[in-house]
Image (cartoon, rainbow, N blue to C red):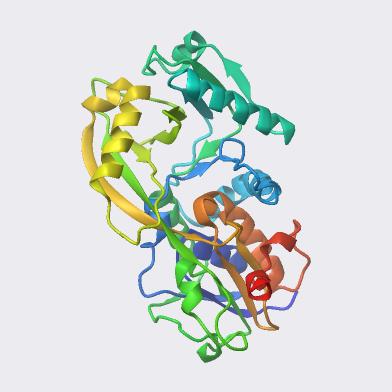
Amino acid sequence: METLHVAVVGAGIVGFATALTLADRGHAVTVYDPAPLSGASHHAGGMLAPTAEVVYKQEPLFPLMTHAARWYPELIELTARYSQCPTGYRTEGTLIVARDRADRTHLEELRTYQHEHGLETETLTTRQARALEPALSPALVGVVSIPGDHQVQPRLFTRALADACRAAQVEFHSAAVTDVSSIDADQVIVCAGLGAAEIGGWCDGDNPLQLRPVYGDVVQLRVPANLAPLLTRVVRGFVEDRPVYLIPRQDGTVTVGATSREDGRPVPVAGGVHQLLRDAIEIVPGIEDCDFIEATAGARPGTPDDLPYLGRVSDRVVISTGYFRHGILLASLAARCGVELVEGRAPSVDLGACDPLRHRRSR
């Protein structure tokens, strides 16, 4: 295998996972980002949930998510090979719950859709669910278990990836990249999230990437000692048809999220935070007694069809961005397939739906 000097533009979870995988394969790697660890990964929930997070009429996304979940243990193992930092990786599974009868109908329709696409779930009674998670409200009317959906703690995991990259001799530059032609490297892979739309030097004319920020409010809580552990599994729910998730962490905190809005406001919105807490309390009443740590808002990089941009766009440049709500999960796929593209190998999964130039042609 030819040893390459590869520039990775962007230091979020996708950039770090890609850089580490490249370095582990013997390449010389330089990461460019003026503000590492500060993008969408900082605000993400971190659920590795190809089954729970299926989206209607997004069939091209399903195999990407399924392969990403299958490859995630390899990424966790690779990180642990270079770093002793915790990742927050947990495998207890997920429960999806319904607050009322209308929500139960939504849950049953979702389960039917999941089964039609070969995704496995198990229906539980409320009593069975509360035997697993006693903090769940006894008023819930529907529960589905998904033992194969796991999680990481994104802030921990990205720090572990950064530490692993340093141990693997990856170099870091704080310069902002606006033109890839200014970078001295054999290959460049652009993993800059929303910022990828502002980077030139790889295409004729204007940058064709149509990325948009989709903001999400997220709340961090701490479980008091008398309630710990409040939960052991991820709990996702529908409350008056609104989705909400609660993610227990090994450090005694719980993440509650997330709203979805395209209003251009990069700060948490009071109504969104109120809605999340209200709905979380409906599912797990003990949330009301937790300590409030913070509320933040992250900007997910969305595309017109909500599918990623992942592919080669020139002899020297690969694009890897637009992972929208699934950036944490798809990081393993982005790293594996991104490295394969850089090395000129066929990707391990069909990336036809992820062509970075597809929306320029559709204009």
From the viewer's perspective, is 56 left or right of 302? right
Q: How many marks?
A: 0
Quarter of the view holding residue 205: bottom right
Please determine whether, in this image, residue 54 is positioned above or below residue 343. above
Depth check: give the residue in front, 145 or 11: 145
Write the residue at 73% across / 32% down: 116
Residue 354 lies, in percent from the top left, at 67, 63
Please determine whether, in this image, residue 17 is positioned above or below residue 119. below
Depth check: give the residue in front, 48 or 195: 195
Quadrant location of the C terminus in the rendered image:
bottom right
From the viewer's perspective, is 335 left or right of 141? right
Residue 284 lies, in percent from the top left, at 35, 23
Residue 139 lies, in percent from the top left, at 39, 13
From the viewer's perspective, is 85 left or right of 336? left
Quadrant location of the N terminus in the rendered image:
bottom right
From the viewer's perspective, is 298 left or right of 55? left
Q: Residue furthest right?
A: 346
Residue 17 lies, in percent from the top left, at 54, 60
Write the residue at 59% across / 28% down: 147
Is residue 296 visible in the rendered image? The answer is yes
Is residue 229 visible in the rendered image? The answer is no
Quarter of the view holding residue 254: top left
Write the residue at 43% across / 34% down: 242
Write the residue at 62% across / 42% down: 56
